[in-house]
Image (cartoon, helix red, strand yellow):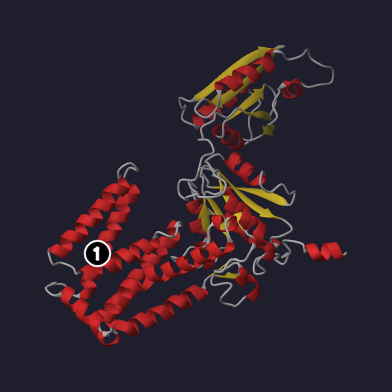
Amino acid sequence: MKIDNNIDTIFDTINKMNGKSSDIVTRVIEKKNYRIGYIFLESVSSDDKISDFLNKSIINLDKKKLFDSFYNQVENSIYSSNLKTCETYDEMFYYLSSGFTIIVVDNSKKAIVIETRESLDRGVVESTSETIIRGPKDSFTENHNKNLGLIRKRIKDPNLWYEDVKVGTRTKTKVTVAYIKDIVPNYKVKIILDDLKKIDIDAIIDSGYIRDLLEKKQKSVFPKVISTERPDQVCTSLLNGKIAIIVENTPFVLILPAVLTDFIHSPEDYYQKPLNMSFSRIVRVICFFLALITPALYIALMTFNQEIIPDQLLISVAVQRDGVPFPTAIEVLLFVLTFEVLREADIHSPSFSGSAMNVVGALILGDAAVAAGIVSPIVIIVVAATSISELVFYDVDIIDAIREWRILFILAATFMGIIGFVLMLIVFIAKLSSLECLGTPYLTPFSPLNIKSLKDSVIKVSTKNMKYRPNYLTKNTRRMGDANEENNS
């Protein structure tokens, strides 16, 4: 709805729209027989900025200039680097909620908008969800412009483009798509922008809403989008040919497309020696399979296929299980559930008591269960090794995906032994092979096999040998020139 040309009508309409909320502040100033009004929300605007700049600008308004409308005089007299205009009530309230002040002049159907935001955000601090040992210590915050600045200060390239979309019919959350124009294929950016514009939802409170809505085409518990607080990881991904989605009021930025190997990588891999990081990645791959299949494999061997186990080990396990009243599958499920409860308690407990309390709880429960003859010691070892293996991954989504597939493996092994375990493994690989994001297969570079991209999959090569970007992300693969070629030329 277009705004009126009368200040009192405009103020009444805004008050009615917001139910005469207590944080709406209005004022009318008379100048040169004209009335100037301004309105702001004191909950999100800075009264000091309004008093220091806006009031002074209006009071010191020059005398009327020939051939110049009063509206133009007001607009040209306000000292603000971020000045806009709006013509509808919807735009007006959006700016008010964003911390802007609206200036209206009688007999004008346009309003002047100036930025007077109050600082309601925490400063740039170290990431709380991703441990940083070596590398930049800053992380994203809830302030949208700060987040864009943390990326811009690292990539000083005019080809770094930002495109904004407002998502959410009620929250009108600003969502920015960031990409490097001459690296990312245009069709991928268009797909993301089109998908964002089609989202019809009341509110976007966190980037997790966007992630779930973008992944609607192929449902999977394995994440196809990376969520991170670290600007250095976002910048590295952008330079490789990926796209970032920055959502207002959340410190978590989305990166896509993601493949499975992205979740065994860490931004710090590029700040340390290649040999050390290659070993770390191999450990993460081993932990991935340990966390996924260890309990199921133990159940299958102990329940159906004991002939595979060496005699000495089988006798030792049988002695430990002597007197245990539950079948192996029940033992494992019981303690898997116990460790999941401890994990949830650790997440939601206060930081000063959570970890210590849950470590003590796990020790006491495990020792008491073995002493009472409810479970065997080998089950405690198997489940504990499984839970510890999860801890090498920092991404919560990949941990949750491993947990859910682990339950499926346990159920298959419980009913069908090794045969069920193998069948579930085939289903698992087939499911991962069927996934893709923006046309990129989830198991790239292993399936389909991409020889050039294997250099930075599990084994990390030195930086001087990484001359090309992954060719499954972009056709502009050249990352680094050849010094010898330059010298020869």
Res. 387 image quadrant? bottom left
Res. 77 image quadrant? top right
Which quarter shows the C terminus? bottom right
Query: Can the viewer see residue 286 in this picture?
Result: yes
Which of the two residues, 408 or 278, is positioned nearer the viewer here?
A: 278
Which of the two residues, 122 or 91, is positioned nearer the viewer here?
A: 122
The residue beneath circle 1 is: 335
Q: Name the residue: 23% across, 74% down.
A: 329
Which of the two residues, 369 or 37, is positioned nearer the viewer here?
A: 369
Res. 113 image quadrant? top right
Q: Name the residue: 66% across, 26% down.
A: 5
Q: Position of residue 16 (x, y in %)?
A: 50, 29
* Element marked by disc 1: helix
Q: Is residue 475 left or right of residue 305?
A: right
Q: Position of residue 26 (x, y in %)?
A: 55, 21
Q: Where 218 sits versus 180, above or below?
A: below
Q: Where 250 sits versus 223, above or below?
A: above
Q: How many marks?
A: 1
Q: Residues within 10 Å of mark 1 (few under 14, many from 20)?
A: many
Q: Name the residue: 48% across, 63% down.
A: 223
Q: Position of residue 244 (x, y in %)?
A: 60, 54
Q: Name the residue: 49% across, 45% down.
A: 127
Name the amino acid type tagged 1.
Phe
Which quarter shows the N terminus? top right
Q: Is residue 103 left or right of residue 62?
A: left
Q: Residue furthest right?
A: 489
Query: Can the viewer see residue 198 in this picture?
Result: no
Q: Position of residue 18 (x, y in %)?
A: 49, 31
Q: Where 81 sits versus 127, above or below?
A: above
